[in-house]
Amino acid sequence: AQSVTQPDIHITVSEGASLELRCNYSYGATPYLFWYVQSPGQGLQLLLKYFSGDTLVQGIKGFEAEFKRSQSSFNLRKPSVHWSDAAEYFCAGASGGGADGLTFGKGTHLIIQP
Amino acid sequence: DAGVIQSPRHEVTEMGQEVTLRCKPISGHNSLFWYRQTMMRGLELLIYFNNNVPIDDSGMPEDRFSAKMPNASFSTLKIQPSEPRDSAVYFCASSSLPGTSGGNVADTQYFGPGTRLTVL
């Protein structure tokens, strides 16, 4: 079965420090991969997506993610976090050209320490 | 451009009552998805439509749940009768099918703000 796993439920990072959120996928073929962010009481906003091509993907708000087929991973990174980055982050995968519904990981809650 | 519109934003109802959630996708999009978010199960796909036709409803939890898309600009998710375990945030999302925008992959799914349902 297709699945997306986010191993870390909570991550605490100091403001200005670097960030890496982990995501692993299990799909029969290379999936289409996404990172979304959800602020409290809000909907989901797309940070970035990977369909094919360059394995390093740039997104909004200074985020990037790297697709690593050998590790079945699609980790999200940011070189320097800001207090406004505190939120819930979801990794998601899709097959079928992306036309199927998304399979989400459980999410990682990011806490920013001053 | 307006994003995905959902109504109501909040719904509080009593067990046994019928609940109808509404969604207006982004104009021009031809795929529509309903998701449910709970603390225990996270975000789950309930059902999705392509060109107003239901494609996969395997995520619909029970026969109490039904969804319709009578036209390209409107969809409903109905729960009848509602139960306390249905309490969750329900999201609607829309996107373009592969080929719609000239590419061979689907466009990004854009999410609405969600409807927070509380069943007492």
Image: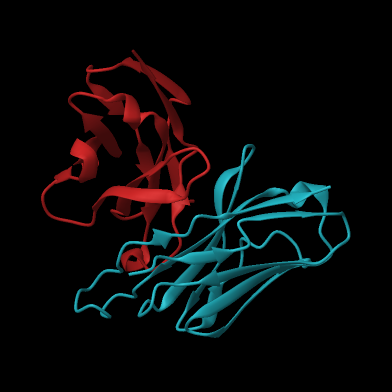
Chain colours: A red, B cyan
The spot of residue A37 in percent (x, y) is: 38, 42
The spot of residue B29 in percent (x, y) is: 37, 76
The image quadrant that residue B9 belongs to is: bottom right
Q: In which quarter of the image is the C terminus of chain A?
A: top left
Q: Is residue A39 above or below residue A13?
A: below
The spot of residue A104 in percent (x, y) is: 46, 47
In-image side of B60 versus B83 (left or right): left
The answer to whether residue B40 shows anywhere in this view is: yes
Q: In this view, does B117 lie above or below A38?
A: below
The image quadrant that residue A111 belongs to is: top left
Q: Residue, x 46% and y 22% (percent of image)?
A: A10
Q: Residue, x 33% and y 16% (percent of image)?
A: A13
The spot of residue B13 in percent (x, y) is: 81, 55
* Front residue (pair B34, B120): B120
* Front residue (pair B37, A29): B37
The image quadrant that residue A72 belongs to is: top left
In-image side of B96 versus B39 (left or right): left
In-image side of A103 versus A13 (left or right): right
* Front residue (pair B97, A68): B97
The answer to whether residue A63 shows anywhere in this view is: no
Q: Residue, x 12% and y 54% (percent of image)?
A: A53
